[in-house]
Image (cartoon, grey):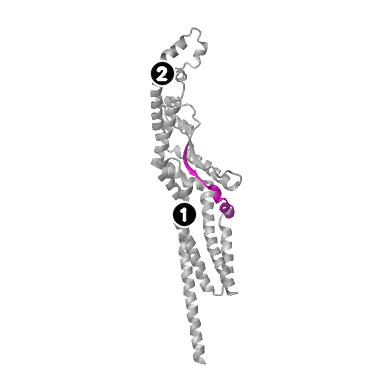
Amino acid sequence: MLIVRWTVAVLAAFGTAASVCLSVIGDWSRDYVTDTEGFVQTLAPVAESRPFQSVIANQVGDIASETIQGLPATTALQDMVGLGQGDANDKSGLWAALQQFLQDPVESALIGVADQAGQLAKDATTQFVTSAAFPPVFNQATQDLHSQIIAALEAPAVDDSAPLVLSLHVDLILDAAESNLSGPTSWMLSLVPETGQTIPVLEISDIGSWRPLYSALGTGGDNFVWLAAVLATVALVATPKRFMTVAVIGAFTAAVAGVLIWRIPEMGRQMFTAVDPSLNEVVNQAWSRFATPLSRAFEPVAILGIAIALTGIILAVGARIIRRSRAKAVITAR
């Protein structure tokens, strides 16, 4: 019977510690994962990272240059000189002859124009991503990512094999950059047609493994606070030594919180992956903005657990000393 009581007490004590830590995770999840504004604001400083801005500007410029080079030379020439569909009404064949005569020079010129447009796109994008107009564009992208995350967590039918991607739309960036410029630069950027491309920044994988925890946490950790109180009561009722059980509850709580403080940074890095290796540091910083508040939230839990464990040990030792003193007094009185 004593073994059963101690088994129940120890299991309930561990459940108490786990419930306390889950309540902390629940509160963090409510503020940083479930809440759209909290999620977006947590990632917002990434838009101000110089390495991130440089990578985005270079990729936009490369895409712009490649897109222009992919255009047919005659079409590009018509667009540049404003002839449009003039060859459709070419009765004398002059336009066709002109096209043939200018084909090679135009193609060479087009490559130069594409390179120049690509460089202008880089410069214009650099100006744009360092301006106050870029954060709203980036925040919209993170909001779209948040919608994907919540949908994946709430819908079991979602394909978990495909990672969720934070990406920026190239056309949106080029349009915004073009609108902030004027003169020949704006005209050169206007030559870039819609690319339909996106720049992937980071991937979040294995989102399905977090679905059970997300469902259990609900809208916060309040339910786990009550569960911790119930389990602690069960442990104290079942145990033959209450003060020692208090110490066990405190020790378990401090241990679980300590392990989480140690493991949280690595857990996120396994999920958050930079698509471009040059953005590894940026992505690590992005995860740290989520992980740091959670780790700090566990620090007082660990300290409180240690304090409870020490208090329980002191009380247990004190109670034992008192019992021995009373036993000696009884023996002496006899």
Which mark, by number, is residue 129?
none
Residue that badge 1 annotates:
264
Q: x and y percent of residue 237 in the render? A: 59, 72
Residue that badge 2 annotates:
106
Q: Amino acid at mark 2?
A: Val
Determine crowd level at label 1: few under 14, some 14-19, many 20+ residues with C-alpha closer than 10 A: some
Q: x and y percent of residue 310 in the render? A: 46, 70
Determine crowd level at label 2: few under 14, some 14-19, many 20+ residues with C-alpha closer than 10 A: some
What is the number of callouts on the image? 2
Q: Specify whether residue 168 is painted magenta.
A: no
The residue lying at 49 percent from left, 67 percent from top is 250
Which quadrant of the figure contains the N terminus? Answer: bottom right
Query: Quick check: 250 above or below 43?
Result: below
Q: Earlier in the sequence, mark 1 or mark 2?
A: 2
Q: Is residue 13 visible?
A: yes
The quarter of the displayed image where residue 121 is located: top left
Q: Nearer the viewer, residue 190 or 6?
A: 6
Q: x and y percent of residue 217 in the render? A: 57, 54
Query: Quick check: 74 above or below 252?
Result: above
Q: CA distance from mark 1 to mark 2?
A: 57 Å
Q: Specify whether residue 201 is painted magenta.
A: yes
Residue found at the far bottom of this picture: 334
Q: Amino acid at mark 1?
A: Ile
Q: Secondary structure at mark 1?
A: helix
Q: x and y percent of residue 280 in the render? A: 42, 44
The quarter of the displayed image where residue 106 is located: top left
What residue span does the magenta drawing correspond to? 199-216
Q: Is residue 219 visible?
A: no
Q: Nearer the viewer, residue 301 or 331?
A: 331
